[in-house]
Amino acid sequence: MLGINVLAGIPIALLLLSTCSALYEDQIKKFDWRSVHVGALKQSRVDLNHFQPRLLVSTHEDVVALLCPKTGAIVWRQVLEQKPRGDIKLLQVSGFSVDSSDTAAAPIGTNLGFDMLTVQGHAPALVRGWNTNIGTIEWEWSINPLNSEKAQDAVWFYSNSILYHIVPAWRSHLEVTAYFASSGHSTGSTSKIMASWITRESCTLSGTFYVCVDGKQLISLDLVSKSTQVIRTALETEPQGTIQAVEGLNGVVIVDGKLVSVNVNQAVCRALQGSSYLVGSFNYRKIVVSAELTSGNLKINAVYLDNCTPVAELQQSLQFPEHFGTPTLNSFDCKLKRQGDGKSCMFVFSTSAESIVAVQQGKVRWSREEALANVIDSQFMDLPLADTEGTLESEMKGKAVDSTSFDRDIASAFLRRISTQAVQIRSLFLHVIGLGPPPTDTQRAGLVRDSFGLHKMLVLLTRNGKIFGVDNISGKHHWQLYLPKVNGFDNAEQMRLIVQRTAKHFPLQPLCAILAKNSINGNGVLYRFNPITGQATEGGLLQLDFKIKQLSLLAETEKDFVKGILILDASNKVHVYPQHATPLANGMYLYTADVKSAQLEGYFVKYAGGKLSCTQIWNARLGGHNSEQQIIAVAGKNPIEHVHSQGRVLGDRSVLYKYINPNLVAFVTQAPDATHKSVLNLYLVDVVSGSVIFSMTHRKVRAPLSIVHAENWLAYSYFNEKVRRTEITTIELYEGKGQANSSVWSSLQAPPMPLVERQSYIIPAIVEALRETITERGITNKHVLIGTASGSIIEMPWHLLDPRRPIASTTQGREEGAIPYIPELPLPTESHINYNQTVARLRNIYTAPSGLESTCLVVATGLDLFVTRVAPSKTFDLLKEDFDYILISIVLVALTSGSLIVKHLASRKLLKQAWK
């Protein structure tokens, strides 16, 4: 019987083996890498005296993590729910305060103690106890407020095992409720404290005191005292900015850089002046540490709180790199040195550039670039040529420019080639004997273009205005720079990273530009820089005297190969940078889209009399009859895209020509509906003529919505509320079996309305991002990269999303190579291009062509960063890694030798036959 069971199990085992697929171990991280982040620092606690030194952090990206204080590496990380549910209101770590009011030991026989306690969200508010050794949740409880709108501004604080929940009703009162921290049971009824002076902008919580600014005085309330009294503290002058609490000092706030106490039992040192303060313990005494950044020099000072005398051991000064931004002291701790001669202290700073910086013994020990958790734009830049390739490039350009003289004087071209090679041999000889010129900075860093164009500089623009130059092969940060006081534009538009000149124009250096909005006056900001070195060029930072409404790159260039930037300001006037490219803007078209009103406007730019003028030529309202529709997505085509095939061969051998309109833009609007809950509309608009080419309506669907638009097709995903699933709809546009114009497209003389093919599919995942693969010539098959909420990136062939998939298998469908329609899209494991390298909070996917037609470069951004390459049609233009060069060499030698031997024998045979 046992033998029969074994024999019956063999076919099942063979079937399972045949369906398994895996990644070879030597391929892991060979063509890809991942950078893991936690986000901008919100609260931190560093403990160097623990049996395992630790740095616990909570961030603005709703992440709690444990970092190694020695290196800054992540020990463990927990990504919480997204805002508002995951917004961390309080981080309380047991045993970190100099007082005994924060201890959280569990009673005997229970497990309700905590190493770390967090409070997140407001409706509901989640209270969780954590085990900080392994990063697991030990227990949790929640509360649901009666008024969720008021609870958005609620604050929490912890004291003596009691958790206090304060809900402000602005200009009215405070509602204070106390809970046992570990169990969530209320200690009594909610107390209501009348406070008609409280406002959102002027109040803060300092320990157990609720402090507000009212003119030249501070008005505060002690929320835990038995008899609540209003405490008024006079100020010398009215504060210029907002007040901030000092963590560790009960009832102490920072007013214009100075400490002010509203607690009669808490004395402060009024002579201190700094931008950030922190309270801790040193030599068993309370100290106040302050930090101030002056002219790039960071000064750290400390005084004893009881007598305000300086702590000489903690005073230090160091040069603080400019790209870190303005530092804010977040936490610190000290420990005895190994030699026993004094103490060593570590100071942890959060910066305006969203970096986490650890300072120890007067120098930066380590730093984490958490701005990369919010990448909003990216570009892959070609690296510069090597010296020898650059010389050859210059020679070939000279031939191309002066082709007539080259034809006329071949001898001069030959002499130029000989002299060039002589110079190369001379430089090689000098380099061998060590007398050659020193390598440039880019050559020393290995930033030289490779043969296949796979090695590039990845330029990343982040939400807070920090720019990074990253090696796409190794992930090394070659340079970084920070633009302070900039942010995105109005109308929910992010800052823009634009390539004005690529690295293909040797010996000219590449040029990139950042366009943003000044956070102070709202005017535009233009910053131009070299993307290979990160150095400012062409004047660097330029503060514009107008607000930016729309911008576009010019299609043509001058002799310097720089594409000008056409900017439309708020008063509908146009500007071009650089200004010498102004005449090239003649005949350009622009469009604007108002997100809230769903109104589109088209403009025509004309250059006459040495001046530019802009005329509105069309407008369209997509908001509906009641103007409730709002634009939630806009998708144009990639400007560097090449369309290789103009049509599609049908089963009867006729050609169905693609509707390839480069001016076609997709707009998606959404509005609530009394009958269908939510209605989503798609419009395909020619933004030159303003005509609506196609529109479609989806009912009972809602965001999240992702859309990708390329060639003659587009695909977009949404959530279907009726059947509660994510769906992807694909659309293809065709001119028909005749082509109106095969050479030049004109939107003003456009062909008739296109034929539209559409289809919907079910995908068993929540889609966060869509992007098409792109190659140098467009010959390679198009695949769609799908980023999911689980952090995986799926490579989906377009033939699976093809809207022309027939319902049943037909002869014509088989001739076209179309797969019969199946609603469910398969997600096989081998289609996940990031295998187990999960990208947390994936938001965007960016693609770029490489030097190989078969290969597309990919970067996925979110909380993490993932860079890889894909080959949709396999690497047809590249030999495999395991290609046997020895065997092919032996075969070639054998064939060559055999042919020579056979030739010799054949000639001898012919000679013998001739003598007969």
Image (cartoon, rainbow, N blue to C red):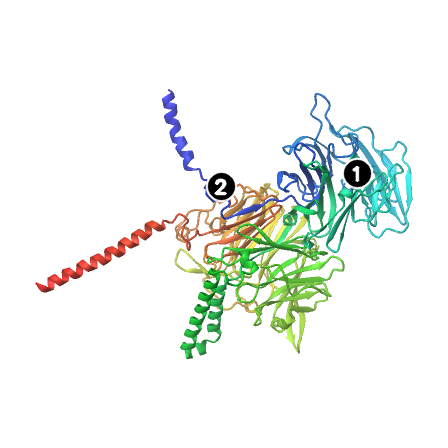
Between discs 2 and 1, the one toward the N terminus? 1
> Of residues 49 and 852, which is closer to you in this image?
49
Q: Residue at x 46, y 63 (%)?
A: 428
**What mark, if any, has residue 248 been given in the picture?**
1
Task: Quadrant for the N terminus, please.
Answer: top left
Residue reaching furthest to the left: 916
Residue reaching furthest to the bottom: 408
**Which SS class for mark 2?**
helix
**Which SS class for mark 1?**
loop
In the shown orientation, is residue 34 left or right of residue 593?
left
* Three-letter amino acid code of the residue under disc 2: Thr
**What mark, if any, has residue 829 been given in the picture?**
2
**What mark, if any, has residue 540 been given in the picture?**
none
Mark 1 nearby-residue class (10 Å; few <14, some 14–19, many ≥20): some
Q: CA distance from mark 2 to mark 1?
A: 51 Å
* Three-letter amino acid code of the residue under disc 1: Gly
Q: Are marks 2 and 1 in contact (CB under 8 Å)?
A: no
In the rendering, at what x and y percent does residue 798 appear?
48, 51
